[in-house]
């Protein structure tokens, strides 16, 4: 995998942090629409070539000192030539999400390499000011290889066409297939914008705001009540139908514009004389 | 949801990882309706994200009490920083108080961590530190079990490390320095021991060890208290212990050796039993959160009532100027021109709008002042104590 892979987790006593290499920035902090402690998937491609991806909420078998399940967060960053590895991770994460991360493949592969003894040792080494980048990078390479070896789930065909900005549910196989298709476009550099599973999103307005910020948005929400069904809500279409009161107040014809211009010109001249 | 007329404040939160920072605010939000019973006030999340986060925290707490057992591990640790926004208001269009709390992973308070973790350093310097410095109230959650269950000398030796008192002191000192530069604003420190259920007899508990807990907080945090007092002598320091769950009690505590920063430190690990009500049900029974909320309201009251009055006066002065300007003579030709172009009417319209806005501000200031007086009049319960 030519992309860069980063891992965030914690030890029994030390808080969540990236072990080994660190991403250059916490770009995901712009996404207040999701709570990273819960399963979240964010893929962004802002320039159309470079992309960044975050997968969170992956449980481990490890527990912290209070007895809380310790989670993994993966950050993957790359460009349009190296999206295949990221697709594997994203595909596994979506498969695991569908099973509420029970017996998840990602968990099992990560736990194999990052057992309690290893994580405690790595965090202790780093706390002492030493470098664990090489070891963590090696373990993450093994994780990538192991995932690539395992067979993935059957890919559901995505809908023939989806809107530019849309909201769907994680309980819909059609929406998940559409999300996978959008992510492939983002990773290949064919699209600018954002796609993902954002667990705090509850309305099309929030997706519209993300689309305005990121360029485009394809978002799945957790929809626990399963009220959305298989629908893919076209967020762009809703915007088009909204009326713009400002536009309605604007002058209706050229004559009005001309009169207004003459009055403002005369006012300016008078102020100049004063 | 958030209102533009609301008066906005920041509250700083400082404590180590897993101390219960998020749980404290979930408890306050959950218990607030009881405090405001019989008054027009209510506390609501000021944005959708806080609403969902609080709902998640409530689910976690209920999950922790599932099947009549208490599993503290069901409450998630904080992985990234976020802002919790709450609004206290009395309904209708009257302005309220919006207070924002920056929640973050506890390890970020440690300068050694920030020195080796550039992401933590950036987030701390760009978001958390400015928020803390501009906060009028600093809340310091304290894990009561760490203080009270440390019976052997080797346990007690670990307490400052477990509670990160040195880092808390550094943050509190910086906060107090800024408060000293802004002496016209409130400066309140709230020590909030959490997980206090086993040490009070006012919430279903059998033992009253509240004096011992108070003594230990004063002793272990003496350097923090001295730092605040030294930097900002006007700061008020209060003690408000909170039962964030209420219906649980420690059965036994084992101290385990753990590694932190490459050193071996002892951490307590407690087993809890659940106190059930007469119907055999185990329901959360928060206690003490009302004191935190009253302290927050009182700190804001005087400051904001004055601010509301100042704003109303400023608007009144603008309206006076606009009215004078509207009727001002510009000479014969000037007046004729203003009449012909409609500028005189425009000036009068502006003056009218300014007066309407000033009157509205005046009404807001009056209603806010009344509301604040009622909030400030609420009495603390017995658990609250004054440290300084």
Image (cartoon, rainbow, N blue to C red):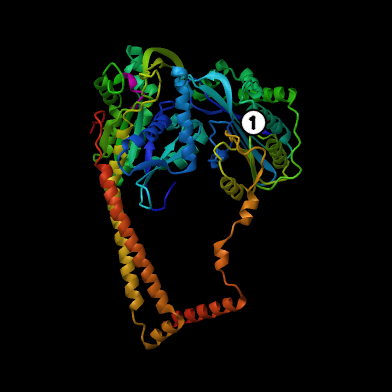
Q: How many marks?
A: 1
Q: Which residue is mark 1?
A: A5
Q: Is residue A38 left or right of residue A273?
A: right
Residue B207 vs B336, above or below: the answer is above
Residue B356 place in picture, x, y as percent: 35, 65
Residue B62 vs A24, above or below: the answer is above
Q: Chain of mark 1?
A: A
Residue A72 place in picture, x, y as percent: 58, 26
Q: Is residue A266 left or right of residue B218?
A: right
Q: Is residue B334 left or right of residue A261?
A: left
Q: Is residue A50 left or right of residue B299?
A: right
Residue A83: which quarter of the image?
top right
Between residue A227 and residue A203, name the one nearer to us: A227
Residue B321 vs A109, above or below: the answer is below
In this rendering, does residue B184 appear at all?
no
Secondary-structure class at tag 1: strand
| Residue farthest along the front direction in this orientation | B279
Residue B109 place in picture, x, y as percent: 42, 32
Residue A164 place in picture, x, y as percent: 68, 48
Instruction: Decide whether residue B194 is among the magenta residues.
Output: yes
Residue B253 vs A57, above or below: the answer is above
Instruction: Decide whether residue A186 is among the magenta residues.
Output: no
In this rendering, does residue B119 appear at all?
yes
User: In the rendered image, which quarter contains the C terminus of chain B?
Assistant: top left
Residue A248: which quarter of the image?
bottom right
Between residue B16 and residue B57, name the one nearer to us: B57
**Crowd band around label 1 with a 10 angstrom C-alpha radius: few (<14), some (14–19), many (20+):** many
At 47% from the left and 79% from the top, the residue drawn is A267
Which stretch appears magenta? B193-198
Residue A198: which quarter of the image?
top right
Between residue B365 and residue A121, name the one nearer to us: B365
């Amino acid at each position: 995998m030519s992309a860069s892979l980063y891992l965030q987790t914690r030890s029994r006593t030390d808080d969540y942090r990236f072990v080994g290499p660190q991403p250059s920035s916490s770009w995901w902090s712009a996404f207040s629409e999701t709570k990273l402690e819960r399963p979240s998937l964010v893929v962004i491609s802002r320039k159309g070539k470079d992309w960044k991806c975050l997968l969170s909420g992956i449980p481990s078998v490890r527990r912290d000192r209070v007895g809380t399940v310790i989670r993994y967060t993966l950050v993957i960053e790359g460009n349009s030539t190296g999206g295949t590895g990221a697709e594997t991770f994203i595909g596994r994460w979506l498969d695991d999400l569908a099973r509420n991360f029970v017996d998840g493949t990602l968990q099992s592969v990560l736990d194999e390499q990052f057992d309690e003894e290893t994580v405690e040792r790595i965090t202790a080494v780093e706390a002492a000011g030493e470098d664990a980048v090489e070891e963590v990078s090696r373990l993450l390479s093994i994780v990538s290889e192991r995932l690539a070896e395992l067979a993935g789930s059957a890919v559901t065909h995505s809908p023939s066409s989806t809107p530019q900005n849309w909201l769907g549910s994680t309980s819909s196989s059609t929406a998940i297939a559409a999300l996978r298709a959008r992510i492939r476009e983002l990773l290949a550099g064919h699209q600018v914008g954002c796609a993902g599973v954002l667990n705090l999103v509850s309305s099309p307005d929030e997706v519209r705001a993300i689309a305005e910020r990121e360029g485009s948005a394809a978002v799945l929400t957790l929809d626990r009540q399963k009220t959305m069904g298989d629908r893919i809500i076209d967020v762009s279409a809703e915007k088009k139908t909204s009326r713009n009161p400002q536009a309605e107040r604007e002058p209706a014809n050229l004559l009005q514009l001309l009169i207004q211009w003459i009055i403002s010109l005369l006012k300016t001249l008078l102020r100049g004389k004063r | 949801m958030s209102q533009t007329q609301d008066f906005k404040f920041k509250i700083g939160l400082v404590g180590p990882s897993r101390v219960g920072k998020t749980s404290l605010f979930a408890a306050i939000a959950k218990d607030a309706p009881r405090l405001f019973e019989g008054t027009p006030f209510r506390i609501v999340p000021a944005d959708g994200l806080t609403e969902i986060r609080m709902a998640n925290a409530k689910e976690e707490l209920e999950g922790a009490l599932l099947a009549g057992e208490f599993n503290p591990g069901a409450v998630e640790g904080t992985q990234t920083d976020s802002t919790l926004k709450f609004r206290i208001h009395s309904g209708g269009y009257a302005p309220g108080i919006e207070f924002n709390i920056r929640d973050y992973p506890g390890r970020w308070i440690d300068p050694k961590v920030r020195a080796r973790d550039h992401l933590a350093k950036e987030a701390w310097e760009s978001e958390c530190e400015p928020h803390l410095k501009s906060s009028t109230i600093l809340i310091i959650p304290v894990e009561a079990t760490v203080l009270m269950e440390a019976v052997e000398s080797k346990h007690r030796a670990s307490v400052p490390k477990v509670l990160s008192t040195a880092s808390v002191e550094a943050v509190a000192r910086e906060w107090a320095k800024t408060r000293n530069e802004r002496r016209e604003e409130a400066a309140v420190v709230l020590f909030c021991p959490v997980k206090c259920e086993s040490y009070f007899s006012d919430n279903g508990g059998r033992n009253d060890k509240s004096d011992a807990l108070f003594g230990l907080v004063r002793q272990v945090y003496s350097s923090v208290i001295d730092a605040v007092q030294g930097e900002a002598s006007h700061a008020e320091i209060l003690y408000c212990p909170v039962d964030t769950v209420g219906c649980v009690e420690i059965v036994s505590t084992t101290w385990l050796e753990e590694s932190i920063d490459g050193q071996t430190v002892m951490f307590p690990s407690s087993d809890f039993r659940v106190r059930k009500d007469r119907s055999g049900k185990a329901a959360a029974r928060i206690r003490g959160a009302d004191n935190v909320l009253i302290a927050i309201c009182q700190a804001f009251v005087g400051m904001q009532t004055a601010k509301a009055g100042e704003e109303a006066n400023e608007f009144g002065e603008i309206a006076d100027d606009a009215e004078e300007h509207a009727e001002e003579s510009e000479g014969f030709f000037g007046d004729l021109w203003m009449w012909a172009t409609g500028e005189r009417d425009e000036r009068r319209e502006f003056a009218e709008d300014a007066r309407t806005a000033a009157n509205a501000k005046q009404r807001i200031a009056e209603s806010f002042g009344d509301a604040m007086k009622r909030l400030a009049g609420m009495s603390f319960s017995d658990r609250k104590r004054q440290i300084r």
